[in-house]
Structures are given as structure tokens and as C-alpha cells.
Image: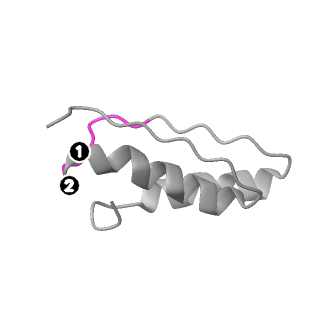
Amino acid sequence: MPRFGDGLAVDADLVRAAETAAVAARTPLGGLNPDLACVFVCGGDPEKVAEALARASRVDRKSA
């Protein structure tokens, strides 16, 4: 089983992109929680960026 995962998503909806990338990154972990996660979100609206980061942090192993 891999010990790392990665995810990349591009979408006009930053929240959906963040969730998609987070799920993709967690999938190879087979339900294990990561010890470290690095999330990068780029967008023009600071509130949407914050919302996207929050959504990525709420993705749990059941979503993966």
C-alpha cells in the first residue's frame, strides 16, 4: 500500500476542486489518515479560497 497520495483538480468552483483533489490524494492511503497534508488553493476571492481549504480539510476516509 502506498504511503502517500496526491491530488490535483482545476475547476471554476474552488470548493469542488479542493474536495476532488483531497479525495484523490487520500484514495491511495486505503482509508488511513495522513500524518501530514499540504493543500494549496489559488483563487481571486479570499473567502472562496478559505472555504475551499476548509472543505479539503473535512474530506475524510469515507469520501475517498
Q: Which region is colored magenta?
A: 31-37
Which residue is at 72% across, 61% downward? 13
Magenta-drawn stretch contains 49: no
Residue type highlighted by circle 1: Leu
Q: Are marks 2 and 1 in contact (CB under 8 Å)?
A: yes
Location of residue 8 by image quarter = top right
Question: Residue farthest to the left?
Answer: 1
Mark 2 Cα shell of 10 Å, populated few (<14), some (14-19), many (≥20): few
Residue indicated by mark 1:
29
**What numbered label is drawn on residue 31?**
2
Left or right placement of residue 42 versus residue 17 in this view: right
Question: Residue farthest to the right?
Answer: 44
Left or right placement of residue 49 versus residue 56 in this view: right
Which residue is at 67% across, 53% downward? 50
The kind of secondary structure the magenta stretch mainly shows is loop
Looking at the picture, how far across and down is residue 18, in whole percent? 57, 53
Question: Residue farthest to the bottom?
Answer: 62
Count of marks overlaid on the render: 2
Magenta-drawn stretch contains 32: yes
Looking at the picture, how far across and down is residue 3, in whole percent? 21, 32
On screen, residue 40 above or below 11:
above
Location of residue 25 by image quarter = top left
How far is mark 2 from mark 1, CA to CA? 6 Å
Quarter of the N terminus within the rendering: top left
On screen, residue 28 above or below 52:
above
Which residue is at 20% across, 34% downward? 2
Residue type highlighted by circle 2: Gly
